[in-house]
Image (cartoon, rainbow, N blue to C red):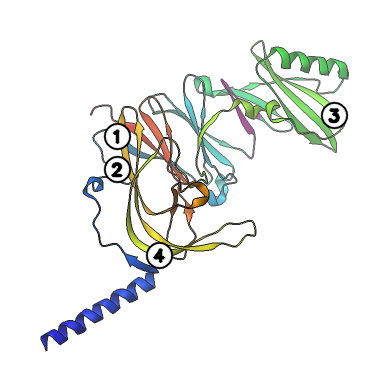
Amino acid sequence: MQNKYFNTSTLITLLISIFSYSCNGILERNEQPLDSAYVHIQEINENYRSDIFEVKLFCETQVSSSSSPNPIRIFQSVNNQLIVSCDAEKNVEMQGDMVYYKIKNNGTVEDSLQLNLNHYWPDFIDDFIIFTTDDHSYYTTWPQNGDTSRHAIQILNQDLNWKEEKVNKKIEQAKKNIPYWFLKNVTKDDQYYMQFFYYENKQWYLLWQKVSEYKSPDDNETANRFRKDVFWTGEIDPYLPENVNFLHFHPEEKLKYSHNIGGGSPGYSVKNWRGKAFFQTKIGEYEFNFFSPHIAVEKEKFDNYKNRFYTIVESSYPAITFRPSFYISPNGFAFYSSNSQSMYIIREKTSK
């Protein structure tokens, strides 16, 4: 009787286990423990504990209301600083808001600035932020010294009384001899204009020019060319960046998930293992190890069997590209992001 009871109990347990797997979409579980070499490696979040590094959430954004696929960006600025640009929109009242953080070379925030892009469009040009609309413009020196005072831009030929030859000559000379200049096109009352901004003798100028047809300035003639982005969130690339090494994969459960191709092409399903993926990078003089959960690793012949990484939220859900991206400063800190919504800062502790 005891053996019969044991067999029945075992069968019931097995059936419950199979039913549970089926309900969760799990096809198989890995019962092997994690290799002891990786047990103490942690996930990147604010619970990360280390004698060498501190990890903090730097900024978050609401991608669902963001117009940009890369809502957090980092670009170079004056005084060996970085500026972090983050979409600050969280509700109707904050629609169009951006917040900018000025980062010193030790990784600390020196200053921040919140702007609403529905009012003026800001262009960062070294020491200056140039704010423009079709009708008004001004500049500040916030990147250089934190001053947000509005400085007037001197307007030339607003009444369009200059001869075309004079306008063209001034633009030609400025392009040839002045480092800071850019073009912006404007349409008003079915008329087309080109605004030529330039900096000369410690003063910003705006020269109006009427043109016969609509024409967008070339990329090398816009203010955007002065901004050098070095990092942005939301990169859709399943391959690791060059500054990250793949250490180990620990499978946890096998399940079925899908890939959405888009563009009218049909998707396809995959049966694969999901688990913890372990990585390493170097920040300052030290190695920084971390893992990410719910990762599937794929290899195929078409790309010479390179590792491709995806986050699998649940069975039957589409795979989400996983790319652990770092901007690593030579000064002992780094920014990290693996999605559009958030970015972490990782700094060496001052006393170790």
Amino acid carrying label 1: it is: Phe
At numbered mark 4, what does the secondary structure look like: helix, strand or loop?
A: strand
State how far apart marks 1 and 4 are (Cα): 35 Å
* Labels 2 and 1 touching (C-beta < 8 A): yes
Amino acid carrying label 2: it is: Tyr
As rendered, which of 137 and 288 lies closer to the eye?
288
User: Any mark on residue 211, and which?
Assistant: 3
**Res 116 → quadrant:** top right
- Residue range corresponding to the magenta coloring: 118-131
State how far apart marks 4 and 2 are (Cα): 29 Å
Q: Which residue is mark 2?
A: 48
Residue 109: tell me if it is visible: yes
User: Any mark on residue 255, and which?
Assistant: 4
Amino acid carrying label 3: it is: Val
Q: Is residue 133 magenta?
A: no
2 or 3: mark nearer the eye: 2
Residue located at (48% from left, 57% from top): 319
Chain-order first, disc 2 or disc 3: 2
Image x and y of residue 40, in percent: 24, 45
Q: Residues within 10 Å of mark 4 (few under 14, many from 20)?
A: many
4 or 2: mark nearer the eye: 4
Pick out the residue farthest to the top: 201
